[in-house]
Amino acid sequence: MKVTRFEDLITWQKARELRKTIYTVSGQGEFSQDWDMRKQIRSAALSVMSNIAEGFERNAIPQFLYFLKIANASCAEVRSHLYAAFDEGYVTQQMVDRLLQRAKEVSRLIRGLAGSLIFKLGTGHRAQGTNNVS
């Protein structure tokens, strides 16, 4: 099946779910009052899904790979902020573990997608959802 829209990428869908959860959690209790941390974690979570979408729409594998690297780095930023939120007592151990697991899943999916694109780039085949290789 050829993917023709970024919305069809499982990686983007999981990143979207992560963003929604981060927004919900950061909007509750004391977390919602820490404006700096709340803004940072929300921005990072939004960046993950946005960079996947933007890279896909560039229609070139090298550019898609570049945006996937940014998305994965933003996912690491989300994880880092989650540790800070836990340290401040904004989230419980159970909550941080669940959110870290989700963020790690998104990172694995991003790396898997990137690996697939690298393979296709190396073999000269077009990746699904891209129009060309340059």
Image: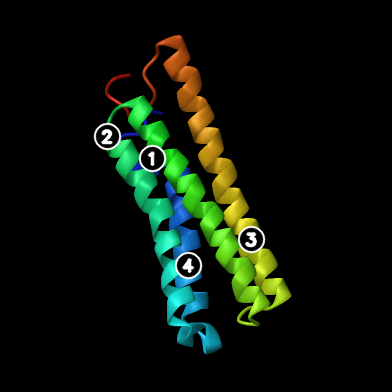
Q: Which residue is mark 1?
A: 67
- Circles 2 and 4: CB distance less than 8 Å? no
Q: Earlier in the sequence, mark 3 or mark 4?
A: 4
Residue 78 visible within the image:
yes
The residue depicted at 42 percent of the width and 17 percent of the height is 121
Residue 65 in percent (x, y) is at: 42, 32
Mark 4: few/some/many CA within 10 Å (<14, 14-19, 20+):
many
Distance between mark 1 and mark 4 Cα atoms: 19 Å
Q: Are marks 1 and 4 in contact (CB under 8 Å)?
A: no
Rounded to the nearest angstrom, the CA distance separating label 3 from label 2 is: 29 Å
Q: Amino acid at mark 1?
A: Phe
The CA distance from mark 2 to mark 4 is 26 Å
The residue labelled by disc 3 is 100
Going 48% across and 74% down the picture, which residue do you hit?
37
Which residue carries the number 4 mark?
A: 41
Point out the tag, 2 or 1, that comes first from the N-terminus.
2
The percent coordinates of residue 80 (x first, y second) are 59, 61
In which quadrant of the rendered image does the N terminus lie?
A: top left
- Give the answer, above or below, for where 65 lies relative to 37: above
| Residue 66, quarter of the rendered image | top left
Q: Secondary structure at mark 1?
A: helix
| Residue 5 visible here | no
